[in-house]
Amino acid sequence: MARSTFKVLFYVNGSKEKDGIVPIMGRVTINGTVAQFSCKQTIPKTLWDAKGNRAKGKSAEARNINLALDNIKAQIIKHYQRISDREAYVTAEMVRNAYQGVGSEYETLIKAFDKDCANFLKRVGKDRSIGTYKVMVRARNYVAAFIKSFYKRTDMSMLELTPDFIKEFAAYLTAERGLKNATIWLNCMWLKGVVMRAHYNGLIPRNPFAQFHISPNVKEREYLTEDEIKRIMAHEFDNPTLALVRDLFIFACFTALSFVDMKELTTDEIVEVNGEKWILSKRHKTNVPFQVKLLDIPLQIIERYKYLSEDKLVFGKIVIVKTCSDSLFSIGQKNCQLFVAKLRNFLDSHNRMVLY
């Protein structure tokens, strides 16, 4: 391991001389990085020892200046030791900022991630959804687990990040977590976002992930044909729960509502305009207003399950269960298998629902 070099020295800024008085400056050097600062002290130019980096003589003024410089050096050494105990990579700027009480000496990746998560959470219910927040937190936890596994630490400085970090993170998600390419892409995008914001806010001098690109390789989502929709609508079910699942799916097909929007649909949101029924509501995820005209088929479905309505919820209390997708396979008769498979894929990519 290369030996760490650390040095503190003092000098006077002759270009700022005024009436023979010059300001005293400090310089921190660590492993080739340099940071300068003002000592908030002045001295007669003739009293300064350039070789010794101190005031000359034993006068009261010289003793006071040297005492102040010794105190500054002691503080800088203390900050250097403290940061070195916590960080694997220390720069002169980090130590200088710590001494001055400014800057981002504590800016580490996980702490930055936590800040972004906290800021995101404040927007949930306004222009962000709780589901997306949970995805962000999951990405944060993957990064924390990767740092612990790969670097044997709980956090790391932003300044340590290199292009290899995110490449190794992606490899970790594949080998250790068994994630697919689209999910790996999503987690890497959350990580890139945190680091990009840190760079834009001046917390790190460069964005180490700027050139990193990964393709999600998302398969084109299949869709049901008109004939397949007609076949599933015409299918007879012995199980009333399966019939409800089918009808909710058909309702979504004709209204373009997500499952959560359909789950939260109330009778107050169905209004009559010029003799026609419309849904006037807001998207659960984005809180963006939308309006959908209700055609005959979705109106028939609403009427069919009118008896389930409770607390103004059009379809009553619907809860999420894991068995719904599996139960759809019982629909898979000889001439229905293709659209049932597509229906299951659709449900797997959304919240799966059944009557409680």
Image (cartoon, grey):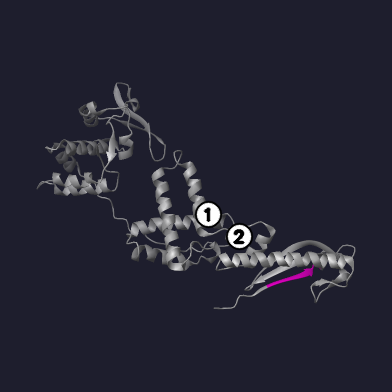
- Which sits in the foreground, 253 or 38? 38
- Which sits in the foreground, 204 or 131? 131
**Magenta stretch holds residue 8:** yes
Residues in magenta, as a range: 7-13
Q: In which quarter of the image is residue 232?
A: top left
Can you see residue 339? no
Q: Which quadrant would the N terminus be assigned to in this image?
A: bottom right
Q: Residue at position x 55%, y 58% from top?
A: 199
Residue 45 x %, y %: 87, 69
Q: How many other residues sit within 10 Å of disc 1, few (<14), some (14-19) or many (≥20)?
A: some
- Which sits in the foreground, 260 or 288? 260
Residue 117, label in figure: none
Q: Residue at position x 61%, y 60% from top?
A: 105
The majority secondary structure of the magenta stretch comes to strand
Task: Indicate whether 292 appears above or below 143.
Answer: above
- Which sits in the foreground, 96 or 282? 96
Residue 150 x %, y %: 43, 67
Give the foreground label among 2 and 1. Answer: 2
The residue that disc 1 covers is 197
Q: What residue type is labelled 1?
A: Arg
Q: Residue at position x 46%, y 68% from top?
A: 151
Q: Secondary structure under badge 1?
A: helix
Residue 105, label in figure: 2
Q: How many other residues sit within 10 Å of disc 2, few (<14), some (14-19) or many (≥20)?
A: many
Q: Which amino acid does label 2 sit on?
A: Glu
Residue 355 x %, y %: 24, 36
**Magenta stretch holds residue 95:** no
Q: Residue at position x 47%, y 44% from top?
A: 121
